[in-house]
Amino acid sequence: MSPRQLEYFLEIYNQKSIKKAAEKLIISPQAVSKTIKEIEEELGVKLFLRGKKSLEPTAEAEYLKNHALKILDEYEKINSIKKFNTSKRKVLTLYSIDGFLQYVTVKFIEDFQIAFPDILLNIIETTERDILDKLDQRIIDTAIVTTPPNNDIFTSVYLYSNKNCLVIHKDNPLSKKDEIFEYDLDNQPIAGKGYEYSCYSSNIKRLFQNNINPQIKLETTNDSLIIQMASKNLAIGITLDFIAFNANAKDIVIKPINGVSNRNTFWVENNYAILTKEQQIFRDFLLKWIDYNRSELFNWDFDTK
């Protein structure tokens, strides 16, 4: 008795009809009927009795149903083992700062999968503090960060730059200004990424050091929530340029902050670690891909705002 025959039997048991079972299985009623006869002949029992409106399972059918479910479940587990053993895909886990995947877009993933179908990417976006801690503890040996470790243990390679920007409701007077300086944020309600993010924390720290005191209304890892706060005129959002523009939010104006430096992003690897073949492949592909597609990646030109 084959798994296919058991599947046909269970479908008839559930549908109580040869015709309905055939429709579900997308085969002819004759094929379904033939399969049931084959099972009955093999077991030497009657599985269904024809009632007034439907087929009625016999006691033997009830017994077979319970065992058929167990057999098909075990068969599925065996197939899973076979698929696992025959799979050649290697899982490559990488840690990156928040927003990396949104910046390189799905095209990066698509191109990588075409070039290396045997490597399954598992990219974990997290805070930079978390990444730096993992690098320091040798939990990971490679990462994508904005603040590379300042020591001889790691090598960093520049990837790209973004700008921090302000997301302002159109009714806020600051939205009408041609240039916004840090002192304009004094006493303004602010929503941003939080102190786990080095770029945000350094900017906020600098404001307080310069006696500029914004009112921090929200700190969150959720950029869409930051932009929603601005869209509802509850706060001025601080986020990255490409995230702000990609949101396409209503009633907001996106402005640069005069005098604030770019956020640079780097590939980092441990000089004393032996990288796996997959890590080396990803690194080389990433560097070449960024260089080749640089003109297509988001770049905020203030002159065209």
Image (tube, rainbow, N blue to C red):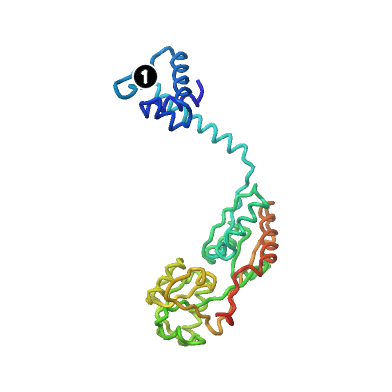
> Tag 1's secondary structure?
strand
Q: Residue at x 34, y 22 (%)?
A: 55
Viewed as shown, does residue 133 lie left or right of 14? Answer: right
Can you name the residue that lies furthest to the top here?
A: 44
User: Which quarter of the picture shows residue 288?
Assistant: bottom right
Q: Residue at x 46, y 22 (%)?
A: 30
Q: Nearer the viewer, residue 46 or 181?
A: 46
Tell me the residue that label 1 is attached to.
48
Q: Quadrant of the C terminus?
A: bottom right
List x then y, in percent, for residue 89: 62, 45
Viewed as shown, does residue 115 lie left or right of 241? Answer: right
List x then y, in percent, for residue 180: 50, 85
Q: Nearer the viewer, residue 111 or 264?
A: 111
Q: Nearer the viewer, residue 131 or 152?
A: 131
Can you name the residue that lies furthest to the left here?
A: 52
274 relative to 11, above or below: below
119 relative to 146, above or below: above
Q: How many marks?
A: 1
Q: Nearer the viewer, residue 175 or 85?
A: 175
Viewed as shown, does residue 266 lie left or right of 178? Answer: right
List x then y, in percent, for residue 189: 40, 79
Q: Residue at x 69, y 66 (%)?
A: 291
User: Which quarter of the picture shows residue 106?
Assistant: bottom right
64 relative to 158, above or below: above
Residue type at mark 1 is Phe
User: Which quarter of the picture shows residue 131?
Assistant: bottom right
